[in-house]
Image (cartoon, helix red, strand yellow):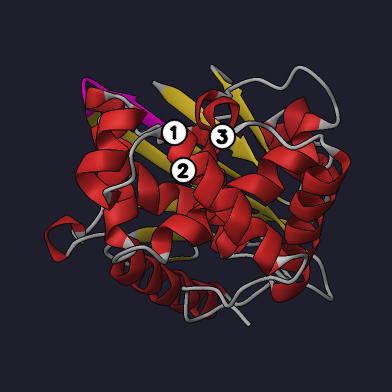
Amino acid sequence: MQTRFHGLFLILGLVISQHAGAAEWDSQSSNFQIRTFRGGPNAQQLLEQCERLRLDLQQVWLSEADRRDWSPRCQVIVHATKASYQTAVGGGGAQTSGSSLVQASRGVIVNRRIDLLYDAKKGASALPHELTHIVLADRFEDGHPPRWLDEGIATMADSQEKRTLHHRDCHDALRSGDALRVVQLLRLEQFTSAKQVPAFYGQSLSLVHFLAEQDEPTKLIDFAEAAIERGYDRALRDIYQIEGIEELERRWRKYAWNTGARAPQSLVSFVR
């Protein structure tokens, strides 16, 4: 199984450049291998940032038993130019500044990789979002969490400004009647119209917030795993004592209306 996330868009079955595997790394630790470029971010500082972010994300979303060192380590490649970045990640990443790749074989993750397009003002700003995808993959046999969960949690690691925009999109979709039904949101893998895109990401972020507030955030991952095994209705009853998707729809919509267009405080400590 091979999965690559391009910022907001998921692409399956993408064949990527493998040039990174053979070259030397600028810095590495137990969990990461870093390559940057001359004049780019300091590799050791970026390595330390990656380790801190990984620990923060694991402490919020994973149980203590799941917080293991990574083998293989996650490769983080920082690109100086858009051309270099797109060569590495493919055409699907044309409008993005970050892309993550997880490959799994027979239930074991065999490759972890993040590509970042560096910006002199924003730095490697896409790192928290992309690293979230890598962290979450550990809990799923094929390295592929449900899309609403994966993008909702990853978006929670974005800046306050980005999260506010996503919550605004959610609120706008509710007001206009363009919001996806929760049953659609939970099962959506491919977009069928352009207007689904902002609604999907805004609603996914909002739904993740709602469910994470019902119990310990780690229960959200338990819920997603239970839904894969037993279906969403039973998983909702078992984990959250919510009587199926229809009740979740009612309760989440009330929560989303009351929240409005503002972004609730993120559960991840490094987000401002």
For image coordinates 76% across by 17% down, the residue present is 192
Residue 139: give x, y in percent of width and height.
Answer: 27, 44
The residue type indicated by label 1 comes to Ile
C-beta proximity under 8 Å, tags 2 and 3:
yes
Residue 178: give x, y in percent of width and height.
Answer: 81, 34
The residue type indicated by label 3 comes to Val
Element type at mark 2? helix
Residue toward you, 206 or 259: 259
Q: Say if residue 2 shows up in the picture.
A: yes
Residue toward you, 253 or 222: 253
> What residue span does the magenta drawing correspond to?
102-107
Residue 182 is tagged as: 3
Q: Say if residue 72 shows up in the picture.
A: no
Indicate left or right for 271 with 133 as reference. Answer: right
C-beta proximity under 8 Å, tags 1 and 3:
yes
For image coordinates 44% across by 33% down, the residue present is 245
Element type at mark 1? helix
Q: Which residue is mark 2?
A: 248
Going from N to C along the chain, the mark reached first, 1 or 3, is 3
Q: Quadrant of the N terminus?
A: top left
Q: Which residue is mark 1?
A: 245
* Inter-mark Cα distance, 2 to 3: 8 Å
Residue 99: give x, y in percent of width and height.
Answer: 62, 44
Residue 171 is tagged as: none
Element type at mark 3? helix
* Inter-mark Cα distance, 1 to 2: 5 Å
C-beta proximity under 8 Å, tags 1 and 2:
yes
Residue 109: give x, y in percent of width and height.
Answer: 29, 35
The residue type indicated by label 2 comes to Leu
Indicate left or right for 42 with 87 as reference. Answer: left
